[in-house]
Image (tube, rainbow, N blue to C red):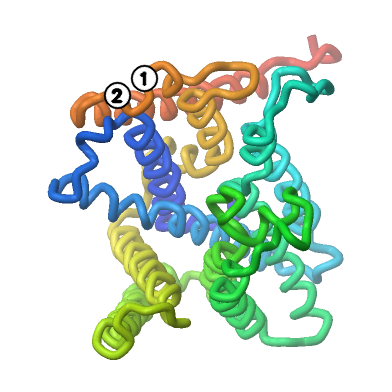
Amino acid sequence: MEKQERIIFIDLMRALAVLMMVQGHTIDAFLADEFRNSDSLLYTIWLTVRGFTAPIFMISSGVAFSYLFAVAGKPFNQNPRVQKGIYRFITLVLIGYLLRFPTHKVVEFSSVTLEQWLTFFQIDALHLIGTGILILIFLTYISEKYKLNIFVVYGFAALFFFSMWNITEYINWANYLPIPFAAWFYHRTGSLFPIFPWAGYVISGGILGTYLAKNPGVFRTKQFVTKLSLVGITFLVFASLLSFVQSQYLGYKYFLTDNFFVIFLRLGVVLLLNGFMAAISLYVKNIPDIIKLIGRYTLTIYAVHVIILYGSAWIPGFAMFWPKSLNLSGSILAAVTLIILMIFMVHMLEKYKFVLKKKPSPSEA
């Protein structure tokens, strides 16, 4: 995106997504159970907002990658984003597993318990986003090879991952596959973000990112803001209708629309939020560099803040010492402190990169 005109609202969404992730993880790690009261309006608002964090994070990742892929304007086998996307997939999945590595001994696993192995194989946000990027690459290849409309391909793929959740979640995959593979398909092994339905959000982001790439400058128009907001409102209206049908005629019993209600609700909210950010960008010609950098260092921020909070096989995390033991103000202070620390880290990393670029090579010295 650096070689193209920056799309400000994408920068804003990526920064918002990762900072929401940091504060959500921090407060959840430290807030004592006595303050997790559904009667508390503040806690209810926080919990509701947190439920949209992962969809924002994943949709934003899909938007950014697909935009860069499509804006390159090259055939699939010549597009540099293919190799970069595959490298991104490998990097995200490896880091995802390393963050949950079960022992500090790299090649000796005799002391690892079954519970630790199950934790290691759980699928988290990094695994899912990396896999979503790989799926986008595959779908783009299929679209180009068979001359299919890319938006139709992405749309049907997103619908597939969303709808299949109602089947895959109720299959005990561990009966048919080893746990490392079964964990990718459902939540019952402890996975937070199996590919059903979560890959659908990354692919949905791919639709928006591709649209932006194929319509240069459209993000600078009020018509785009209006259309994006109307699509978001349409999803919300449809979600409300599904909820009404469930409550009035199905008594909230299990039905195919149970998950679709949540999916349409999330998509609607995230699209409206994108529309809001796009509206802001109409009047803001530039944003502070630190916001762009936060979006650029998303992976680093994610990995570092997870290690600080939860630790790893080699480093203890702060949540190990004060697990769910702080009051509301203490938890908020911890979240604000960690966000400031992550912003400072990004600033220093960029400053270090600048110094390295200025440093003369041995041949020049």
Q: Is residue 22 depicted above or below 130 in this figure?
A: above
Q: Are marks 2 and 1 in contact (CB under 8 Å)?
A: yes
**Residue drawn at the location 38% of the way across and 49% of the way down:** 286
In the rendered structure, which amino acid carries the disc numbered 2? Ser
Q: Is residue 91 left or right of residue 316?
A: right
Residue 56 picture location, percent across and down: 43, 57
Residue 278 picture location, percent across and down: 35, 64
Of residues 190 and 23, the one nearer the viewer is: 190
Of residues 209 and 23, the one nearer the viewer is: 23
| 3D distance between C-alphas at marks 2 and 1 | 6 Å
User: Tag on residue 148?
Assistant: none
In the rendered structure, which amino acid carries the disc numbered 1? Trp
**Residue drawn at the location 44% of the way across and 82% of the way down:** 255
Tally of numbered discs:
2
Q: Is residue 100 depicted above or below 341 in this figure?
A: below
Picture quarter containing residue 139?
Answer: bottom right
Q: In this view, does 361 lie to the left or right of 191?
A: right
Q: How crowded is mark 2: few (under 14 residues within 10 Å), some or many (20 or more)?
A: some
Residue 243 picture location, percent across and down: 30, 80
Residue 193 picture location, percent across and down: 56, 54
Residue at the disc numbered 2 = 325
**Residue drawn at the location 76% of the way across and 46% of the way down:** 90
Secondary structure under the numbered disc 1 in the rendered image: loop
Secondary structure under the numbered disc 2 in the rendered image: loop
Residue at the disc numbered 1 = 322
Task: Identify the image quadrant of the C terminus.
Answer: top right
Q: Which residue lies furthest to the bottom in this view?
A: 249
**Residue drawn at the location 37% of the way across and 45% of the way down:** 287
